[in-house]
Amino acid sequence: MAYDLKQEEEVKEYIENLGIEYRFGCYKEKKPEVCHLLGDYLEAIKKDFNKAAKVFKSNCLDYNFGKSCLKIGNYTLVGKGNEKGDPAEALTYFEKGCSLNEPGACLHAGMLLTATGPNINIKRDVPRGYNYLKKSCDSNDDMACHYLSGMYMTGVPKNVADFNPHRPEKNKNIDFLIKPDMKQAFTFAKKACECGNMYACANVSMMYKKGDGVEKNETESKRYFEIAQTLQKAHETTKEIKFQQGLDGK
């Protein structure tokens, strides 16, 4: 049946039929991809976060669908959909999603394991977190590459309380789990830029300008600055909302 999506009643009918389609494909045909779409439908169209959370959780645990593990991990992290906000439990979903090769889940697992703060009920484990971030970056997740670049720019101290971000000269004698390394920082920043991260492109431009981690090159500095500007402009002007983004987005 062809729908005239300019007509309000036909739009409503189309949306209801879409929900029926997704429920059939998930509950009867047991297709993980369709279950994920059902979760997206319940979240974006019906605004029923409780039911969406149940679908994502089941699809992660029962059908091993990595993108649903990322979704239920995010829900659990912030306490959405009647899920209690619990970083430690969220980490289990992110780690499962990462084992299923979902780059976004690897990113979030890595960030939780390397983060510090009063609301993080997770034992800090930088080596393990680093491996998750590296796996995500290797899968071309721009944020993971950008995050790794930042870790190498400042270094990762063994004892965070010893680190002084405003007085770098005071950090020379402290123990680092990851020592500052501008060459590594440049490598990850460049990859993050190539994956579309405008902040990483700006960093690459500045590193070329200063000669941090790479030989000074004004031409390349200017080129990456222009790339950063182009990405920023695209980010500001693109207001596209995609339903069914669950299968190809985060």
Image (spheres, helix red, strand yellow):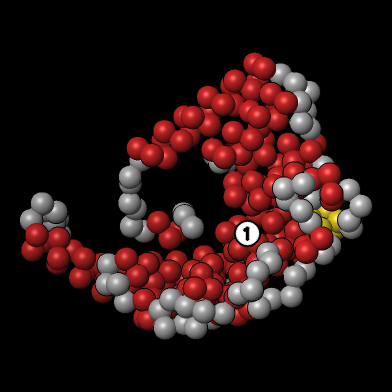
Quarter of the image for residue 114 reads bottom right
Front residue of this view, candidates 245 and 113: 113
Q: Percent from the top left, x then y, of residue 55?
A: 42, 78
Q: Tell me the crowding category of disc 1: few under 14, some 14 to 19, or many 20 or more residues within 10 angstroms, Cα based.
A: many
Total labels drawn = 1
Q: Percent from the top left, x then y, of residue 202?
A: 59, 33
Front residue of this view, candidates 209 and 39: 209
* Residue drawn at x 46%, y 36% as measured from the top left: 232
* Residue drawn at x 37%, y 67% as measured from the top left: 40
Residue with the most extreme right position: 173
Q: In the picture provided, is 137 more to the left or to the right than 177?
A: left
Q: Percent from the top left, x then y, of residue 179?
A: 85, 50
* Residue drawn at x 70%, y 45% as measured from the top left: 149
Res. 166 visible in picture = yes
Residue with the most extreme top position: 219
Look at label 1 and name its amino acid.
Leu
Q: Mark 1 points at which residue?
A: 107
Q: In the picture provided, is 103 more to the left or to the right than 214?
A: left
Q: Helix, strand or loop at disc 1?
A: helix
